Image (spheres, coloured by chain):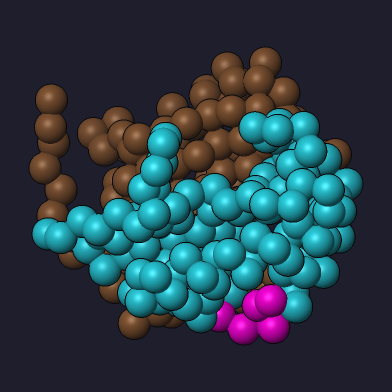
Chain colours: A brown, B cyan
Amino acid sequence: MIVRRELEPLLANVVEAGEMIFTAGCIADDESLDVGGQTRQALGDLDRWLAMCGSDKSHILQVVIWLSDIRFRDAMNKVWLEWVDPANLPARACVESRMATPGCLVEIMAIAVKTGASSKART
Amino acid sequence: MALIRHESAGILSKAVEANGFVFTAGITANDRNKDVGGQTKEILDEIDRILALAGSDKSKIVSATIWVTDIRNRDAMNVQWNEWTGGKNLPGRACIEARLADPKLLVEIGVIATK
């Protein structure tokens, strides 16, 4: 059973398939913000999208982060560390790419499971 | 859990089935002389073929990642994307710029679908 939420012309912002959740690349609405501000706004949207599907940030499996300039990594990470659940860190990749608009400095895409799924810490 | 790999050769499989999902490789066009629209169309046809191998189809795609070698080609790619999706069953999607394996490749698309 696939549920597609927040449909836009080209994509769905978030898609549920059984216990799994797939997001679109999440970007800040306000491109005047610096990379930290854009990251905060994008992660806020990600929280909202996951909540819509009965999940939350502690249930993210994988995250891909694109930065328009890899030198933004430290500034992005500062906000990431404030946001992320330290007990439930996802697998993550962060790479440099140009994105749809020049003002977009960061884009974040996630795969998560619903909160019903069990979580066991592994060393 | 059964793990089925389709069209495995050399360095990768074209698609892998696991746990009710199908994960495709990044698909590129065979005819590298085509423009970005032509390459995109070829890729999307190939994705149709690969998903069919795994008993899936484009209406079951949940996630798509699109790499273009020049982000200014996004609109031309999107024309083909829109024609192919018909605006229905839209997945989560990200489209970003990246260098690809061959300079003549203009676009590459990977998807995740359910079976």
Q: Quadrant of residue B21?
A: bottom left
Where residue B31 sits in the image (x, y, percent)? 74, 52
For the N terminus of chain A, the image quarter is: bottom left
Where residue B34 sits in the image (x, y, percent)? 83, 54
A114 in relation to B103, above or below: below
B86 drawn magenta? yes
| Magenta span dominant secondary structure | loop
Where residue B74 sits in the image (x, y, percent)? 81, 54
A91 drawn magenta? no
Q: Quadrant of residue B82?
A: bottom right
Q: Residue at x 52, y 23 (%)?
A: A78
Q: Is residue A18 left or right of residue A53?
A: left
Which residue is at the front of the view, B48 or B33? B33
Which residue is at the front of the view, A99 or B80? B80
Q: Residue at x 70, y 33 (%)?
A: B102
Part of the protein shown in magenta = B84-89
Q: Is residue B54 left or right of residue B44?
A: left
Q: Residue at x 50, y 39 (%)?
A: A64
Q: Quadrant of residue B19?
A: bottom left
